[in-house]
Amino acid sequence: MKALRVVFAASTALCAATAAQATDLEVTHWWTSGGEAAAVAEFAKAFDATGNKWVDGAIAGSGGTARPIMISRITGGDPMAATQFNHGRQAEELVEAGLMRDLTDIAEEGNWKEIVFPSSLLDSCTLDGRIYCVPVNIHSPQWLWLNNSAFEDNGLAVPTNWEEFVAAAPKLQEAGIVPLAMGQQPWQTTLAFQTLLTALAGPETYTKVFGDKDAELAAGPELTKVFQAAATARDLAKDSNVQAWNDATNLVITGKAGGQIMGDWAQGEFQVADQVAGKDYTCLPGLGVNEVIQTGGDAFYFPKVGDEAITKAQGELAKVMISPETQVAFNLKKGSLPVRGDVDLSAANDCMRKGLDILAKGNIIPGTDQLMSADSNQQVNDLFVEFFNNPEMSAEDAQAQFASIISSAD
Amino acid sequence: MAAATGPARWHRNLSAKIAAIPMIMTALVVFIGGTAWTVLYSFTSSKLLPKEKFVGFAQYERLWSSSKWLISIENLAIYGAFSLIFSLLIGFVLAALLDQKIRFEDTFRTLLLYPFALSFIVTGLAWQWILNPDFGIQQVVRNLGWENFSFDPLYNPDIVIYGILIAGLWQGTGLIMCLMLAGLRGIDEDIWKAAKIDGIPMWKTYIFIIIPMMRGIFITAIVLIASGIIKVYDLVVAQTGGGPGIASEVPAKYVYDAMFLSQNLGQGFAASTMMLLTVIVIVVPWAYLEFGGKRRG
C-alpha cells in the first residue's frame, strides 16, 4: 500500500512539471446533519477550485464517536490529510508528540495574527509559539431556540428570557407540547448546564469554575441556584425522548417542542427547513439573560505525512479555509460566526447579527475545551448525562459531585 | 521432570514443536506481554499517549470513587448472574424437550439456533426496536385493547439491564441448547432403559443421573457463557448506548470510554486490570480444584 502511494506520489510529482497539480486530500470531520453537510460542501467546492480534490471523510455520530477514530488513525500511522477537532486541548497531546504539521510559516505569510478575531481563537491553535491549526468558525453553545407559533398559538407571548420561558411551560404542557427538547447524548446535557451556568450565574463565575477550577465556588450558593434551574430544565424536558441534537431541533421546528438549549449550529437546521429568523423562530443568546459568546469552535489540523504533494496541498487547503470568500460562504450555511472580523456578512440573518454584535462588544468567554482537558470534560459529561436522566438524583447530590470533579480537574 | 527422562525427549515430535512456536510466541508476546504492559501503564498518568509518569494507585482510587464504574460493576453482576442461570436453564430445558424424539426436530433446532448467527450489533438494534415503547411490544399490546399496558425497559433506568439481558439470552441460548442436545445424545440408551425398569420418574433421572453425567458439557457451556458475560459491550452500545443516563454502563464500555473518549489511557488500563483481576479471582481457585486436585490423586 505504502509503496503504491509512493509510486502515485512520484507520478504526480512528474505530472506537476507539465500540468497543474491535482492531489486528493482526505478530510475527516463529523459534520453530517443537513445544515452541516451543506456547509462542508462549501469547503469542498472552494478547495476543488484550486485544482485539487477534496475527498470527504465524514464520520457520523457526533464528535464523541468520530474523535477516537481520528486519533487512532493518526497515532496508528495511517493519518488523513486534514481533520476537524474542536480547537483547544483535544489535540494537545498529538501536537506535543509531533504528529501534527506546523503551520507557522503559512500563518505568517497569511498574516493570521492580524486577521483572526478574537485573537484567543488563534491562541488555542498555538503551542510554544508555533501554530498548528486553522480555526474555521466560532460556535457558541449559549442559545435558546424557540418556535414562535408554539407560543403564539397558545395565547402566550414569545419569551424573551429563561424565566419567562419557565413561566410559559405549564401552558405548553397543557397543549401537549414538550416545553424543552433535549437530546440525550452526553455532550448535550453538559451544554445545557453550562449555558444555564453562564446565563444565571454570569460569565465571571463560569471562568472561575472551569478556568481556575474554583471548587469552593462550585460548591457555593451561586451554583446551587444553577443546579436548581438545571433540575427545572430536566423536568421540562422529561417527555423529550430523542437522542441526536438535530432530532431535538426538529421537534422545535415542527412545533412538537417549545424550545431547545443548543449551540448556534442549530441555526443550520432551521435554514434547511426554510424557517425565517425572527418570524418563525426566535433565538436568545445567553438565554436572554447574560449575552455572551463562547469562542470555542471548530478547527482543522493537518497530520504530518511524508509526501510532498500532499503536504503542499495541505497548505493550500489551510489558505482556502481562512480566505474571506470561503469564510462567508461556509459560515452562512453553518450558522456559525466567521473567524475574521474583516469580512462582509450582509447576507447574515437576524440571529447571526445578534451573535456578531455580541462579538463586536467583546462579550466573550473561552470554551470548556480550551479550559479543561478532555478527561475532565468527560467526567463532567458523565455527571450531567446521569443527572438529566435520573429524576431521583437531587440537585444537591449533583452539585457535590460536580464540586469534587472540579477540585481534581486539570 | 525433563531431566529425569533424559535429553532425548527434546527431539521427539520435533516438527510438531517447531510448528507450535508461532502460537507460543503469540501467546507470550501478545497475550502475556500485552497484559503485563497494560498493568504496568495502569500505574501511570498516561493521557492520550502512553507516558512513563508513575502515580501509584491514583488511577485505581479514582476508578473506585467513580459512580459510573460502580454502576458498571453492578450491572455486570446482575447481567452475569441471570445470564448464567437462565442460559443454562433454558438451554437445558429446550434441549430436553427436543430430545423427546419429536417431529420436525431439525426445523426447531435451526429456528432456535438462528439468533446465534446474528452479531450483537444486529441483535441489539432489533431488540431496541422491539422494546421501543412507540413501535414495539408496548404499542402492539396497547393496540390490542390494553390501553394502560406499559413495557419500556430500555427507557427505565431501574430495569434497563434486564432489557439487555433479554436480548443477550435470545441471542445466546440457542448455542447452549445445541451443546446440551449433543450431550444428551451422548448418553447411552441403556441408562434410560435401566432407569425406566427401576421405576425412577423422568425428572429424577435427569437431575440425578443425566446431568451429573454431562459434567463436561456443562463446564464447556459455563466457560462460553462466562466469557460472553465479561466482554459484553456491543450489545449495550447498540441497544442503549449506556443509557438512559449511565444506567446500563458495563465495564468493557467504561474501558473504551476512558481510553478513547476521555483520552485517559491510564484510567482505561486501571479499569481493564480490575476486569482481569476479577476473572483471575474466579478462575484460579476453580482451575486449582479442577486440575490441581487430579494430579495429586
Image (cartoon, coloured by chain):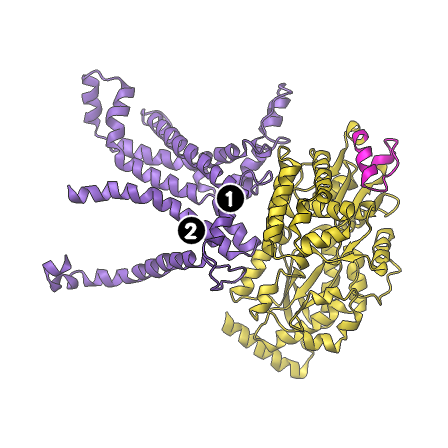
Mark nearer the N terminus (1 vs 2)? 1
Q: Report if residue B230 is visible in the image.
A: yes
Where does residue A287 sit, x and y in percent of width and height? Answer: 80, 45
**Residue A101 occupies which quadrant of the picture?**
bottom right
As helix, strand or loop, the secondary structure at mark 1 comes to helix
**What span is in magenta?**
A150-171
Q: Are marks 1 and 2 on the same chain?
A: yes
The letter of the purple chain is B
As helix, strand or loop, the secondary structure at mark 2 comes to helix
Location of residue A328 with respect to B212 vertically, above or below: below
Q: Which residue does the image show at 68% across and 67% down from the upper left?
A: A125
Where does residue A94 sit, x and y in percent of width and height? Answer: 58, 65
Near-viewer residue (A68 or A47): A68
Q: Which residue does the image show at 50% across and 32% down from the upper left?
A: B162
Instruction: Give the colour of chain A.
Output: yellow
Left or right: B13 with respect to B67?
left
Where does residue A24 sit, x and y in percent of width and height? Answer: 64, 69
Q: Which residue does the image show at 66% across and 72% down from the upper left?
A: A314
Near-viewer residue (B92 or A23): B92
**Residue B220 occupies which quadrant of the picture?**
top left
Q: Quote the CA–CA distance across marks 1 and 2.
A: 13 Å
Q: Which residue is mark 2?
A: B273
Where does residue B233 sit, x and y in percent of width and height? Answer: 49, 45
Circle 2 marks a residue in which chain?
B
Location of residue B98 with respect to A79 vertically, above or below: above
**Residue A253 occupies which quadrant of the picture?**
top right
Label of residue B69 in the image: 1
